[in-house]
Amino acid sequence: MRKGIYAIIVASALLLLLAALSLRVGAVSVPLLEVWNSLTVQHSPDSFIILQYRLPRVVIAVLAGIGLAVAGDILQGIVRNPLASPDVIGITKGAGFMAAAVIFLFPGAPSYVLPLAAFLGAIVALVILMLLSRRMTLSPSSFALVGVAVGAVFQAGIQYLLVKHPSDVNMALLWMSGSLWGRDWQDVLSLLPWIAILTPMVWLRYPKLNVLQLGDEGSAALGLNVPRQRFLLLLLAALLTGSSVAAVGSIGFIGLIAPHIARLFVGGRHQWLVPLSALIGADLMLLGDVIGRVLIIPREVPVGITTAVIGAPYFIYLLRRERKNA
C-alpha cells in the first residue's frame, strides 16, 4: 500500500512538471513566470497563447493518455499478457480505419463526423473480436492472436485507402500518426465526459479484474460470471480507446507501456494499477508531445511518432523478456 501511494505521488509530481514544461516550450518560448501569470488570470502578453493554445493541448494530452493507458490495463488484465494493448489487438486500428474512410470517401463531411467515425470503428473492432472469439470462450492467448489478425485486416484497409486516394494522403497521415496540433477547448469538452465517467467505472470494477488474474476456472470457482465480466470490461476498454483516438488520432504504445511500468511498482493489484497506469499514460503523452515540439522548432513532430520512438525499444525488451520466461 505504501509503495503504491509513493508511486502515485511521484507520477503526479512528474505530471505537474511535464505540464509546466509543455506550457513553456514551443515555437515561442514563454518564461515560467509568464505562464504562472497567465494561469492565475493576471495580465500577461502571452496569456492568449497559454490559455487558448497550450493549456487545452495539455489537458487533452492528459485525458487521452489516461484513456489509452487504462484501456491497456484492462486488456492486459483480461488477456493476462503484458504485450496486450488497444493498438496491438486491433481496436486502435479499427478506429483509424473508419476515420481514414471518412477522410478519403467523404472529404466534405462536417468536422464532428471524424471523431464519431473513429469511435464507431473501435466498437466495430470489438464486436468482430467478440464474434471471432466465440463469445469469449477461447483462451486469453487465442483472443490476443485473433486481435492481432483483426488489426492486420484494418491496417490493410488503411493502406488500400492510402493507395487509392493519394491526393488526400497528407491529412490522413497526420491524423493516423497521432497529433495534438490545433486542439482546442471544444476537443477537450468532447473527450472530458468519456474519461471522467469511464475511468472511475473501471476502477470500481477492480475486484473483478483482480479475480480474473486467477484464470477462467479459478474465477468461475469464486462465483464470477467470466464471459459477462470480460465483455463489460472489453466494452469499457473499447469506449476509452475510441474516445481517445477520436480526439488525438492513432497513438500507439501508451496503452502497452504505461500499465507495464505501473505493474513494476504495484504488482497486479488493480486498485493501485488503474490510477497509476492512468498517471503514467498522461506522463508519457505529455513527454512525447514536449519532445515533438522542441526537436525541429518551429515545426512539430506528431506525438504518435515520438511515443512510438519511446515505446518501440521497450516493446522489444518485453518481447525478449517474454521469450526468456517462456
Image (tube, rainbow, N blue to C red):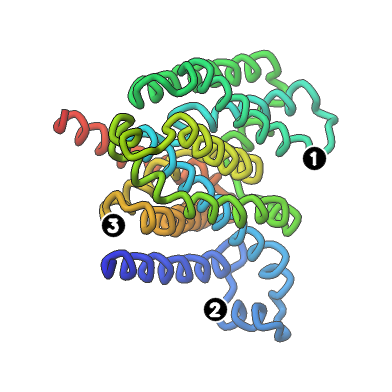
| Picture residue at 16% right of the left edge, 28% below the top | 326
Label 1 or label 3, whichever lies nearer to me, is: 3
Q: Is residue 44 above or below residue 303?
A: below
Given the image, on which type of amino acid does mark 1 rest?
Answer: Ser
Q: What is the number of the mark on residue 266?
A: 3
Q: Helix, strand or loop at disc 3? A: helix
Judge from the rendering whether residue 289 lies leftward or rightward of residue 104; answer left or right: left
| Picture residue at 47% right of the left edge, 48% below the top | 70
Tag 1: Cα neighbours inside 10 Å, few (<14), some, or many (≥20)? few
Q: What is the number of the mark on residue 111?
A: 1
Given the image, on which type of amino acid does mark 3 rest?
Answer: Val
Judge from the rendering whether residue 243 lies leftward or rightward of residue 111; answer left or right: left
Task: Indicate the quadrant where residue 225 lies.
Answer: top left
Count of marks overlaid on the render = 3
Q: Are marks 2 and 1 in contact (CB under 8 Å)?
A: no
The CA span between labels 1 and 3 is: 41 Å
Residue 99 placement (x, y as % from top left): 68, 30
Given the image, on which type of amino acid does mark 2 rest?
Answer: Leu
Label 2 or label 1, whichever lies nearer to me, is: 1
Task: Indicate the quadrant where residue 218 lies.
Answer: top left
The CA span between labels 3 and 2 is: 34 Å
Viewer-side residue, 282 vs 39: 282
Q: Is residue 6 above or below residue 305?
A: below
Residue under numbered circle 2: 32
Q: Is residue 296 visible?
A: no
**Sequence-wise, which precedes: disc 3 or disc 2?**
2
Judge from the rendering whether residue 214 lies leftward or rightward of residue 134; answer left or right: left
| Picture residue at 46% right of the left edge, 48% below the top | 69
